[in-house]
Amino acid sequence: MPEQSLPETRTPGSPTRGPGAHGDAAEGRPGVSRRTLLGTAGATGLALGAAGGAVGYASAPARATPLTSVGAGRAMFHGKHQPGITEALQASGHLVAFDLAAGAGRKEAAALLRRWSATAERLMAGETAPHGDTGVALDAGPSSLTITFGFGHGFFGRTGLEKQRPTALDPLPDFSSDRLDKARSDGDLWVQIGADDALVAFHALRAIQSDAGQAAGVRWQMNGFNRSPGATAHPMTARNLMGQIDGTRNPRPADADFDRRIFVPASAEPAWMANGSYAVVRRIRMLLDDWEKLPLAAQEAVIGRRKDTGAPLSGGDETTPMDLDKTDAEGGPAVPINAHARITRPDRNGGAAMLRRPFSYHDGIDRDGTPDAGLLFVCWQADPLRGFVPVQRKLDRGDALSRFIRHEASGLFAVPGGAAEGEYVGQRLLEG
């Protein structure tokens, strides 16, 4: 779980990208909105970002955002990049992978992506699903809903598009910490859903599953959560289920090299991946019973940061650069050699960088009382061979945190650039 935080905080109750929710048409017309049908509060709030994996940057205290404003936040479906990559983490999410049905090929896949894109555009605008709306989210606004689509390695063989499969989508190497369940890994198609309201997220999940029809079936599905907007008094990097501030060094959109590290350049091959990105998805179980037995000082030594403030053990506050040469009172390194935060630093990994956008998860208690909980790790990069892989290999060789986590599922997906007005996601691949 390389330490990084999300690039920006969002303003719940105000647009994430573009204007606020629209639609005042009567019920049954194309422009009908969920909010129009039953009405919601939509007071504009102050900027705030918080989530269970990593979100936001340290900033001056500000008045907490009232939760009644959360529903008004809206992300835009059309754009240079797909939604759900650079937006702040949402409070509720679902990751779901599909396999194309036997006999389904390029034609069926194109029709499916066309349906999915139409549904995503409407739901993200706070409107009802194009057909068969379940009514689950009728009294909610857009709630910063994002729906993101990607293609797995097997998709290209099933659709006769092997020549269009990017080399960056080659299978990830094996890692010593892997205990992968193949049934919950990979997939032909991948969908990421996130929203700041759990019912809005679930509504989108049901609509996407319904749209799959006979063309594709669910391979696996995972549910996640993050801290709700408005839960903290001011924007702050959030905590994971170990109680640690998780993520302080994520790339920021303001960084000069952000696009180069996170998004595929417009000039790259294959051309259909221009402005897209690659998502590595890992279900990482946290061995919480073992972790919670450690005294505070030992937990901080594993991570390399203070648990209360997120400051490096070399001193300062959360944003203070880590001094890897500083020694403690006994003459040893203030930040242990195998500390997670030391190992994952980009300057210790050839500049490798990825944008982490995870969800926490809790799938119940095992019969022996062990919680099945951890992190749905999602990271974005222009090339996983330069982003995720070198960092994970480094972690494999001696990360102190590895004793307390287990990688149980994995996937790698090519996520094309955003759809232009009048296009559906993946159209340049499927109709090119």
Image (tube, helix red, strand yellow):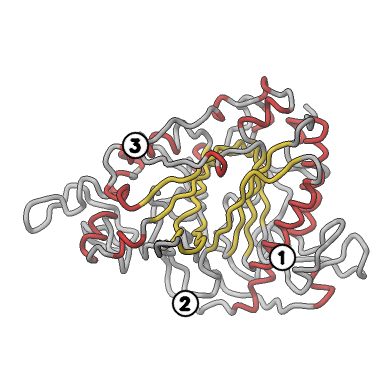
Identify residue type, mark 2.
Ala
User: In this image, 206 relative to 231: left or right?
Assistant: right
Residue at horizontal 46 percent and vertical 43 percent from the top: 354
Query: Measured from the top left, where is residue 161 in percent x and y?
Result: 71, 24
User: In this image, 312 relative to 65: left or right?
Assistant: left
| Number of residues whose C-alpha sits closer than 10 Å to that of mark 1, classed few (under 14), some (14–19) or many (20 or more) | many
Query: Measured from the top left, where is residue 84 in percent x and y?
Result: 62, 52
Identify residue type, mark 3.
Asn
- Depth check: give the residue in front, 132 or 115: 132
Per the image, label 1 sits on a secondary structure element best described as: loop
User: In this image, 271 relative to 101: left or right?
Assistant: left
The reply to whether residue 81 is visible in this rendering is no
| Number of residues whose C-alpha sits closer than 10 Å to that of mark 2, classed few (under 14), some (14–19) or many (20 or more) | few
Q: Which residue is mark 2?
A: 233
Which numbered disc, 2 or 1, marks the residue that appears first in the sequence? 1
The reply to whether residue 174 is visible in this rendering is yes
Cα distance between the residues tagged 3 and 1: 39 Å
Residue 59, above or below 53? below
- Depth check: give the residue in front, 146 or 403: 403
Identify residue type, mark 1.
Pro
Which numbered disc, 3 or 2, marks the residue that appears first in the sequence? 2
Which numbered disc, 3 or 1, marks the residue that appears first in the sequence? 1
Cα distance between the residues tagged 3 and 2: 35 Å
Residue at horizontal 44 percent and vertical 64 percent from the top: 238
Per the image, label 3 sits on a secondary structure element best described as: loop
Residue 82, above or below 308? above
Query: Measured from the top left, where is residue 243 in percent x and y?
Result: 37, 65
Cα distance between the residues tagged 2 and 1: 23 Å
Q: Which residue is mark 3?
A: 349
Residue at horizontal 55 percent and vertical 37 percent from the top: 412
Q: Nearer the viewer, mark 2 or mark 1?
A: 1
Q: Which residue is mark 1?
A: 142
